[in-house]
């Protein structure tokens, strides 16, 4: 049931709504996962009807959500190679739900890390697994009689019980987060090995890099240039090298204003350069995902612009997908209606900052209304000391080491976004951390020592792609694999950590 909540604030009229399984009115003080301008309600009524139908359809086929140890990451064979495996699970999970968990269905008892269910020991008559401490002491990992497989089996029961005991778990991106050792299941996830890509011409995972600085300014990638470089910034050799490196697509940011055909001052030559870049990528067998970049919030709300962009993208050979300018039902509805004239199954990506749980939930809900819409997660980069290059290569290597550990935690967010959107294709990563994205092009940047060692960075064997000649001094294009953002299939979230 969709519960609308109209309210007024100054001169603005906004309608917020929540989705509930209850027909009775929900608590009016509760937060709303999504709000729209009342000016858009007329154009979105039919879309809300489709939302209801899709939600009912999805609910009838979706399996129960669950959390278990990811056997592709941690199995009995490799368990002994993980130092202090018990701590890896008990440290993040023992405190969940204020330390308590129960069984499903309930058995009349409440449990904790200090008191495991007696039923968990019944399959192992040679030991008693009374609590988390006795589990590890009795494991063969510490000289006990419990095999690695049996140890993993009990750990898996513990992970599952804590997850199913957690309130609001299906709306919490971190409910199944144990630094990448567990996997969220919901019936919507796809087996990467057998997945059918929704993107035309792409077999398997989408592996893409963003073409920074072409039509949207990116001073860090263009030597400090204040304006975009244009279609020639990436050469045919660059595209060929990307294909050799294993990429099968590129993500191309384009100003949303390029599609403003209503303006009398509109330059008719804006789109041919975009077509030229699409053609160059296609020559190297690279598909293009178009990313719409609005100049203002008002422009992002312009349904006519979104429609024009989607119509052009769906009808242009070589363009395989479109990233919307905002995560709203109105943007998705306008884009889908326009794209359907050429391709009803044209992939549309709904953007969201991975760190913004409110926006992430809204994006997942929006994408869930369309079987050919997917969440595009941006693990945003900023200019803090932890994100830009350091004053030595040793410190840069340490940042990459720590980032790999942090990256394991991103797995839970990516899996949740795929499940929450009820999409068989899941979610995609559209941006992330990159050491070569720094603030050296900004004259007012703080001096951390990151900008006085560019020669060392460009001449480093650690940074240069191994397929490139070592004597070659990398240009802006030859180090693309480090500074370009990545867009990857949701079940391979670690792939964008170079």
Image (tube, rainbow, N blue to C red):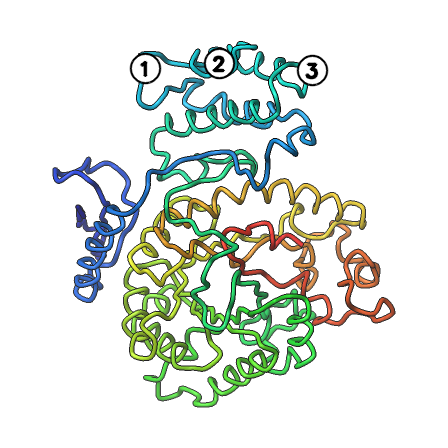
Residue holding disc 3: 143
User: Whole-Å distance between the Cαs marked 1 and 3?
Assistant: 32 Å
Q: What SS does tag 2 mark?
A: helix
Which residue is painted at 68% across and 54% down in the image?
435
Furthest-right residue in view?
Answer: 471
In the image, 29: left or right of 489? left
In the image, 172: left or right of 8? right
- Are circles 2 and 3 on residues that touch, CB within 8 Å? no
**Of callouts 1 and 3, the N-terminal one:** 1
Q: Which mark is residue 107?
A: 1
Q: What SS does tag 1 mark?
A: loop
Q: Which mark is residue 19?
A: none
Which residue is painted at 59% across and 70% down in the image?
211
Furthest-left residue in view?
Answer: 24
- Are circles 1 and 3 on residues that touch, CB within 8 Å? no
In the image, 394: left or right of 359? right
Q: Residues within 10 Å of mark 3 (few under 14, many from 20)?
A: few
In the image, 433: left or right of 328? right
Q: Position of residue 3 (x, y in %)?
A: 17, 46
Q: 27 or 469, which is in the foreground?
A: 469
Residue holding disc 2: 121
Q: 214 or 428, which is in the foreground?
A: 428
Q: Position of residue 83 (x, y in %)?
A: 69, 27
């Amino acid at each position: 049931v969709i519960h609308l909540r109209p309210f007024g604030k100054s001169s603005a009229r906004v309608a917020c709504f929540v989705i509930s399984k209850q027909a009775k009115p929900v608590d009016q003080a509760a937060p709303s996962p999504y709000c729209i301008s009342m000016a858009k309600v007329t154009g979105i009524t039919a879309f809300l009807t489709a939302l209801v139908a899709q939600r009912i359809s999805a609910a009838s086929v979706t399996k129960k959500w669950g959390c278990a140890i990811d056997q592709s990451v941690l199995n009995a064979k490799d368990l002994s190679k993980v130092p202090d495996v018990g701590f890896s699970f008990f440290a993040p999970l023992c405190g969940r739900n204020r330390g308590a968990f129960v069984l499903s269905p309930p058995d009349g008892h409440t449990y904790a890390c200090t008191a495991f269910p007696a039923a968990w020991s019944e399959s192992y008559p040679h030991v008693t697994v009374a609590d988390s401490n006795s589990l590890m002491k009795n494991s063969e990992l510490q000289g006990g009689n419990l095999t690695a497989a049996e140890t993993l089996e009990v750990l898996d029961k513990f992970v599952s019980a804590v997850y199913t005991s957690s309130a609001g778990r299906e709306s919490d991106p971190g409910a199944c987060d144990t630094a990448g050792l567990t996997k969220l299941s919901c019936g919507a996830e796809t087996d990467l090995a057998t997945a059918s890509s929704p993107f035309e011409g792409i077999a398997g995972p989408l592996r893409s890099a963003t073409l920074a600085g072409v039509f949207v300014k990116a001073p860090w990638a263009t030597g400090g240039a204040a304006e975009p470089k244009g279609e020639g910034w990436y050469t045919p050799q660059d595209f060929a090298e990307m294909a050799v490196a294993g990429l099968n697509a590129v993500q191309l940011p384009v100003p949303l204003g390029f599609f403003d055909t209503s303006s009398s001052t509109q330059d008719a030559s804006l789109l041919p350069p975009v077509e030229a870049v699409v053609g160059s990528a296609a020559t190297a067998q690279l598909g293009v995902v178009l990313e719409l970049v609005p100049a203002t919030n008002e422009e992002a709300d312009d349904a006519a612009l979104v429609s024009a962009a989607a119509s052009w993208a769906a009808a242009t050979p070589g363009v395989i997908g479109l990233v919307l300018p905002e995560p709203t039902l109105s943007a998705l509805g306008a884009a889908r209606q326009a794209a359907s004239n050429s391709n009803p199954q044209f992939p549309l990506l709904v953007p969201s900052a991975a760190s913004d749980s409110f926006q992430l939930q809204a994006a997942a809900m929006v994408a869930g209304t369309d079987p050919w819409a997917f969440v595009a997660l941006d693990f945003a980069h900023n200019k803090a000391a932890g994100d830009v290059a350091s004053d030595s290569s040793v410190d840069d290597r340490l940042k990459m080491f720590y980032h790999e550990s942090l990256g394991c935690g991103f797995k839970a967010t990516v899996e949740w976004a795929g499940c929450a959107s009820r999409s068989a294709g899941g979610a995609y990563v559209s941006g992330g951390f990159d050491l070569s994205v720094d603030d050296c092009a900004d004259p007012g940047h703080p001096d951390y020592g990151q900008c006085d060692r560019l020669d060392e960075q460009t001449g480093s064997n650690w940074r240069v792609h191994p397929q490139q000649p070592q004597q070659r001094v990398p240009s802006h294009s030859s180090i693309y694999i480090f500074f370009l953002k990545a867009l990857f299939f949701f079940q391979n979230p670690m792939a964008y950590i170079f």
